[in-house]
Image: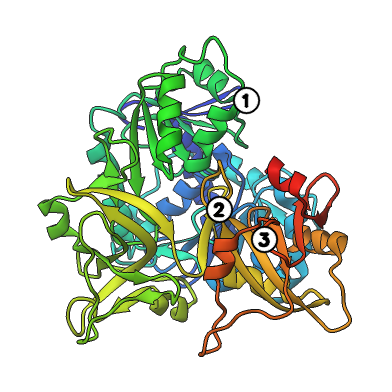
Amino acid sequence: ARRQPHRPLLLFQDEVFTYRDVEQRSSRAARAFSQRLGLQPGQTVAVFLPNEPTYVWTWLALAKLGCPMVGCPMACLNSNVRGQALLHALAAAQATFVLASTELRDALEEVLPDLQRDGIKVFYLSSKSPTPGVEALLPAIEAASDEPLPGHYRVGWTFFGAGWTFYGAGWTFFGAGWTFYGVGWMFYGVGWMFFGAGWMDGCIMKDTEPSPHRVPAGATCVLRSKFSASQFWDDCRRYNVTVIQYVGELMRYLCNTPKRDNDHKHGVRLAVGNGLRAEVWKEFLQRFGPISIWEFYGATEGNAGFINYTGKIGAVGRANPFLKSFAPFELIKYNVEQDEPVRDERGLCIRVRPGETGLLVIKITKNTPFYGYAGDSKKTEKKILRDVLAKGDAFFNSGDLLMMDHEKFVYFQDRVGDTFRWKGENVATTEVEATLAMVNFIQEVNVYGVSVPGCEGKCGMAAIRLKPGMSFEGENFYAFTKETLPSYAAPRFVRIQEALEITGTFKQCKGNLVREGFDPTIIKDPLFFRDEKKKSYVPMNADIHAAI
């Protein structure tokens, strides 16, 4: 803001916000938050906002108050969560305050009695409040000074203080949020400066994710409230975009739009993201021109990752001695059916050979710490794999299967365990199962991900055992899932079984179910398909299967 005050930082619809604008707005907001919230150490501020500029200066305002560094964590909520999922996120974060948009009024009012009962104070970042008992903060923000905040606002700041807790696009709707500490954000920013040097300074970046995740090294960020494949390239031309962000499905959506004569007429020179399949990668380049693609691998709660800046199609990165010394990682043999690593006679894990698929694990060290999940020590421990190469060591379990070729290029293969990815979102099968178990005609349920031709990731399918004397009710099941689950987590297919297969230790078996998928020529059990037009689960037949 000091170096280039008049340079646009955010472009949103027809509005332009310069670096100075955002700096001043965040200073005003910081003063208003300090006065109206009266933050004390140990109190968490939850941010419940859609993808809009307000999110940026709210985030910066709380950072200026030292919230993430002086014992007042900030919880970033997924704006798609509703009902019990929203309450779960707030409870796990131990939120004291919620800063929200009136656009999300219905979602807030649904849970407001519970929040008031728990002593959680809710504020709208608007000029007026449409909800009794909820104060509007915009008048106080506009009345505050826009001068830079003096240092005493951040007394007690430390790199290793409490950080941000995220319940965002990268994690499940009922999952424990991941936590970043101050030092983590320092390295996160340094990483962007390192990789962005010569690329990002002066660029115009189109952010397609549900919050402005990255505005690196003096760039301009184009925000849109919702992604639109049909308008994507028009936006790029309108705003002179030079860098785009993506998640796997986004690139396929762009390739699936009708071809235009001006597909090559744009200024985009770099695409950064993850989840891009090799066949879509090739099609994207053929259609939209020679764009450099930096495909990366990582999880925000993880302790290391890869990035492929060489253009090697399909790879997520390349191993080298420097990376291995800074972030020791291994690919180990994994038994997908038993959902556990393979161990030798000493009880240690076994490395895979080049060309073999293995579970990615990253050693937990001072350089590569794993802070875990907010409010869920069990989930934190579940992500730690012990006695991997030596007794007593500890590695972060990525839950992902990767393969390294003989040239040291690394390729993502699949997810394992209780989590799969669909529509750019992670879905934990155990959490969907817990929700579906509330349906009155369900005795048992086993949720798993199945591959759909032409689609990234896996979509949800549920094998259900009905209660005695009960029948499957397609319309009621659709209404229930519509109300209780995010769209990406609702099962697309249902299979009715007389008994669900279990192991000798009473664990549900998913392997055979996953392999059989939703093919009615293979499966003799009753099958149903989620029909959005009919708002029901309808019987699967050969015509529907062929259309899919």
Residue on which disc 3 sits: 122
Disc on res. 149 = none
Please name which of the two marks, 1 or 2, marks the residue nearer to the observer. Answer: 2
Q: Secondary structure at mark 3?
A: strand
Q: Please count the marks in the image.
A: 3
Label 2 vs label 3, nearer the camera: 2
Q: Secondary structure at mark 2?
A: loop
Instruction: Say the numbered circle drawn on residue 230.
Output: 1
- Residue beneath the point at 87% across and 78% down: 470
The answer to whether 492 appears left or right of 43 in the picture is right
User: Residue at 53% across / 41% down in the picture?
Assistant: 249
The earlier-in-sequence mark between 1 and 2 is 1
Query: Alpha carbon of mark 1 to alpha carbon of mark 2: how far?
Result: 26 Å
- Front-lying residue, 471 or 259: 471
Q: Amino acid at mark 3?
A: Val
Q: Nearer the viewer, residue 269 or 206?
A: 269
